[in-house]
Image (cartoon, rainbow, N blue to C red):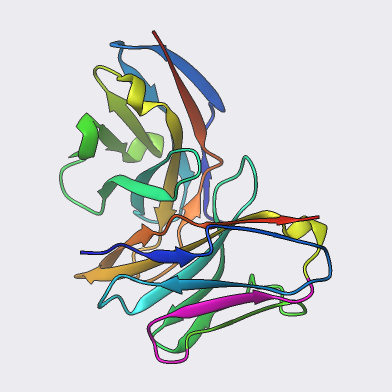
Amino acid sequence: EAGVVQSPRYKIIEKKQPVAFWCNPISGHNTLYWYLQNLGQGPELLIRYENEEAVDDSQLPKDRFSAERLKGVDSTLKIQPAELGDSAVYLCASSSRQGSADTQYFGPGTRLTVL
Amino acid sequence: AQSVTQPDIHITVSEGASLELRCNYSYGATPYLFWYVQSPGQGLQLLLKYFSGDTLVQGIKGFEAEFKRSQSSFNLRKPSVHWSDAAEYFCAVGRPQAGTALIFGKGTTLSVSS
């Protein structure tokens, strides 16, 4: 079974430019997460989807970040315009239900460098 | 508020020696607990998880962890470390409701000396 797929793996852009990240979750996983991981830190949630619906986007900086999951499968996270402080790893995860609990599986991440 | 503390930022262990990585959490009820490992340039791989039942859980790669409610701890152990275990280890806590976000600690970097 394929894992969570993310692309690109690495991205270098100039500040004020737009950038987009793509995620394909594990087949059959209805819940999709985007996490931000700064250097030397653990991941922090940006947004969580249940199928097409964003059910938790309280930590997403909505002035410059946007996300979508149009058909309840793939998802795209966008930053426009990017700032120097956005340099980080952006992780996508998906989860399956096991009774009342779920286990999150992570993709390899996209490492963004803003110059 | 939920939080996870990993007191050790960096640990160095000799190959073949035993390992224990500490994790303490703050949570109002029984949490779901996880350990993930991240190798350089890679995503997070699940090592093991605790939802309920037996407080000693076995994971992949020879790792185990023990949930101690009285100490709010979920320490990760391995009896004999291999050089390939060098990586960053993250402890995480999730709420019992399925589909909620994980709260991660800041991680512990493990170095293995020969």
The answer to whether residue B56 of the structure is visible from this angle is no
The answer to whether residue B78 of the structure is visible from this angle is yes
| Part of the protein shown in magenta | A70-81
Quadrant of the image occupied by residue B35: top left
Number of callouts: 0
Quadrant of the image occupied by residue A51: bottom left
Is residue B22 found left or right of B107 in the rendered image? Answer: left
Q: Is residue A75 magenta?
A: yes
Point out the residue furthest to the right here.
Answer: A16
Where does the image place residue B31, in percent across and percent down from the top left? 36, 54
Where does the image place residue A70, in percent across and percent down from the top left? 47, 91
Decide which of B27, A30 is in the foreground and name it. Answer: A30
Residue at the image point whose x is 60% and y is 44% from the top: A41
- In this rendering, is residue A30 above or below A46? below
Residue at the image point whose x is 15% and y is 43% from the top: B54
The quadrant of the rendering that contains the C terminus of chain B is: top left
The quadrant of the rendering that contains the N terminus of chain B is: bottom right
Where does the image place residue B22, in percent across and percent down from the top left? 43, 29
Residue at the image point whose x is 58% and y is 75% from the top: A77
Point out the residue furthest to the left here.
Answer: B54
Is residue B65 found left or right of B36 in the rendered image? Answer: left
Q: Is residue B44 magenta?
A: no
Is residue B36 found left or right of A87 in the rendered image? Answer: left
Where does the image place residue B60, in percent across and percent down from the top left? 21, 39
